[in-house]
Image (cartoon, rainbow, N blue to C red):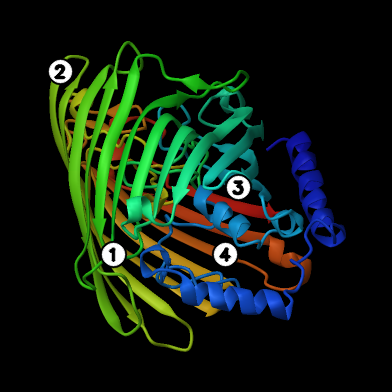
Amino acid sequence: MTWRNIQYTCWLVFFCIGCVLWSKYLLAAEPPKTEAQKKEEVQSNKESPTIIKINNPLTSGTSTPFSAQETPGHTRFDFDNLTKLMEEHKTPLAAMAPDWLNLAVEHRTRYDVFDNGFTRSIPGFNDQIHQRTRFLMEIKNIIDPLKFTLELTDIRAPMAKYGQDHSPVFANHFDFTQLHLGLHSKDFLGTGYAAKFEVGRFMMDLGEARLVGGHRWGTFSPAFDGLHFMVGNEQEKWSLRVFGARPVQRDPNSMDWNTPETYFSGAQVTNRDLRWANFDGYFFQLNEGNNLRKRNLSTTGFRLFAKPTKKSMDYEIESMYQFGDTRDKSVFAHRHHGEIGYSFDTAMPLRAVYLFDFSSGNRDPDKNFDILYAKRRVEYGPTGMFGPFFPSNLLSPVGFRATLLPLPNVRLMMSHRAYWLANKHGAYVGSGLQDPTGRAGSFLGNMLDVSVGWDPQFSYLKRVSFDIGYSHIFKGDYFNKVADGLSADTNYGYTMATFKF
């Protein structure tokens, strides 16, 4: 890092500290509730129908922002988390706004750095400052049951190398990520089930987001222009979701617009009636015209799982099957995820998980499993400018993750996984590396991932969250044989601060 970049980083750190120390009013806690408001809230909770009541064990309320049962893929930075905080008036702007208006602003700054790269394009040192600012607004209760949602997002990489500051993967200067009109009903056609219908630009999180996910820990946040309908509740009982849309194509310096001649549609059904057999089933269809890789892919799959609870075993199984064609080449690929976990009933909540992943591969990269619009932070470590592993042509039969809460507002997470290519003749996806002869073998190595999250829950600091993490790739024989200069182990680290107004 040059001296100029070091100065830039120091000034940024000082600015963040100054915001924390002197932004007393912007970061102030929400006003205390009156007795009348508390009674009204209690009465409202009593009268709420079960079908629309959300009772998700993965979130523990404002006083305990973390849970040992949550996954690294579902973070405080996902798009729906800010929406929930805003609608519950747990952001200062929303608390001050009238009943018909919800407002929230979120800013995140992260510094990433790694040495000894793992790709052909970046073989050595790389660092980056990445910033994301989101403005979210909802207008409701004026023409009931209509709701208008607007989200503006500004994504920048002010300190970046290799042209990443102008790449649509890392930058998107002040654009719309959500702009839709919704029709919401708590009693759809007199059935007693909640429902919503949205038209415009929206984002989606389906299941564990292994195929479709919204705002994520990394930088790329897929949005869609089209129609979206859901009835029921994904957290309790059952739900049905149907959508048809065009994916939004990002341009760093111009207005985003939907991808020409590309259509993405699908349906998902969920059931939460059985403690040990929660079920998701889905079918997605992607059709590209002359854009990207001319993919015409159908993806179907299912997910079975038990929600983690204290003093109990839990599990998750998800299988995905993909067929169609890419660049007029016939494709059949599949991906499978499995995990077994146990949540300990200890003074410091602890959960340990065994992980398994397999994603089919082929000598022809066009025939590998396509992850569509998925998150990767769930099982594969930090993404953004790092993200060394894609669930495509990949085998990871040995993986462990442990989550510990030494304090209610502090979460420690550690995972360790071993990775192989599913097909040693195929590509190491995302790296630009491939050995068609197979002589380099298939063992990619092991990765250790450690992170600490802190959500202060006092005074104005409750509007700030801090994260720090470190990952180490113990490279396998594959890197020694496939390319020169890539055999040294990789060290990656990040620090991150997030402000919510």
Q: Are marks 2 and 1 in contact (CB under 8 Å)?
A: no
> Which SS class for mark 3?
loop
Among the two numbered marks 2 and 1 on one chain, the one whose residue lies closer to the N terminus: 1
Among the two numbered marks 2 and 4 on one chain, the one whose residue lies closer to the N terminus: 2
Q: Where is mark 2, residue-wise?
A: 329
> Which SS class for mark 4?
strand
Amino acid found under the numbered disc labelled 4: Gly
In the displayed structure, does residue 123 sit left or right of residue 407? Answer: left
| Mark 4 vs mark 1, CA separation in Å | 32 Å
Q: Where is mark 3, residue-wise?
A: 140
| Mark 3 vs mark 4, CA separation in Å | 34 Å
Among the two numbered marks 4 and 1 on one chain, the one whose residue lies closer to the N terminus: 1
Q: Residue at x 77, y 50 (%)?
A: 13
In the displayed structure, does residue 300 sit left or right of residue 117? Answer: left
As drawn, 473 above or below 393? below
Amino acid found under the numbered disc labelled 2: Lys
Q: Where is mark 4, residue-wise?
A: 453
- Outermost residue toward the right in this view: 22
Q: Position of residue 55 (x, y in %)?
A: 41, 70
Q: Which mark is residue 112?
A: none
